[in-house]
Image (tube, helix red, strand yellow):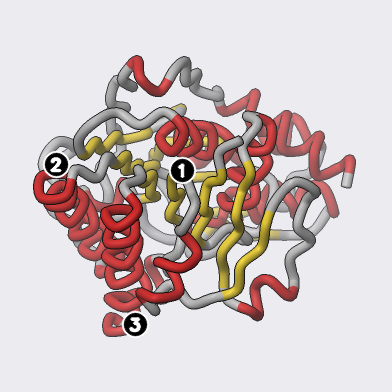
Amino acid sequence: MATILVVGGTGFIGRRVVVQLIAAGAVPRVFDLPQAIARYQAPAGCDVVLGDAVQADDIARAAEGCAGIVHLAGIMTVDCAANPARAIDVNLVTSLNVLQAAARWKIPVAYLGTAGVFGPDSATHPKPMTVYGVTKLAVEGLARVFAADHGVSSLGLRPYIVYGPGISSGIAAGPSIALAASVTREAAMIRFSGRVGFVHVDDVARLLVAGALHPAPGAHVLTMAGDTQEMTDFVAELARQSGWDGIGIEGPPLRIPADLASDPVPADYGSQPVTRLAEGIAATLAELRAK
């Protein structure tokens, strides 16, 4: 039974990765800061390791005996803008530590990038306009170097707006916050407008798990656009399904192209269907209501 290290495993996407690893017959080794682990109720069938991903020795020790790493540690757009030096530590140094551990133990890495590597003017040539996007594009470069120099197989994902049940963070959390607010009948404001790609959190988790358990040689990066819709369409569909109309929209569009195209998923990673927006909203509302 393969053990997979999940760095930042207590977070929004990490929790879904853990569930899918267990379903796949793997043992998740959840790695996170002590304060995050203290709030985490680990499901049966996983290990828990306390540590700081900025510390290379912590990652190297946690990765010993693992068959792969899913790397999710990082801070989001607003926090990166507020403290660029911390963004370099948390987004870039942690990624270097993960890649070094992967090279040491000869195991693959699946990591979370962002569609924010693209600026507003091109959907094909990365030119980020945020500190967050800059750090994530740098991680892609490091992954290519480690594939070439050390044979580390990697899969990086560039999802647009990830939504679903759970506690997300940053400006991109708006749709997830709106979904939760619709269940509790509370007002919520999504802080950006325009046309975006909605990517259900389980689509991201499933592909990350595939990258860790069934790696393809080399350094691969895939854009995930999900289901592209107007933000007004999301709010309208949410109101239709939930019966709640207390969700608002304010703010400019994101500095990312409105119509990104998803990259084809290599056959190595198996079937990776796209959750359509109406389906994703329905599944999220059902899970939130059940809780």
Residue 122: give its label.
2
**Structural distance between the alpha carbons of marks 3 and 1:** 30 Å
Amino acid found under the numbered disc labelled 2: Ser
Amino acid found under the numbered disc labelled 1: Ala
Amino acid found under the numbered disc labelled 3: Arg
Q: Is residue 60 left or right of residue 134?
A: right
Q: Secondary structure at mark 1?
A: loop
Labels 2 and 3 touching (C-beta < 8 A): no
Disc 3 marks which residue? 86
Q: Position of residue 67 (x, y in %)?
A: 46, 43
Viewer-proximal residue among 227 and 235: 227
Residue 67: give its label.
1
Q: Is residue 148 visible?
A: yes
Sequence-first disc among 2 and 3? 3
Residue 5: give its label.
none
Viewer-proximal residue among 64 and 286: 64
Q: Nearer the viewer, mark 2 or mark 1?
A: 1
**Structural distance between the alpha carbons of marks 2 and 3:** 28 Å
Q: Position of residue 43 (x, y in %)?
A: 78, 51
Identify the residue shown where x is 40% and y is 66%: 60
Q: In the picture, residue 92 is in which quadrant?
A: bottom left
Identify the residue shown where x is 24% and y is 36%: 220
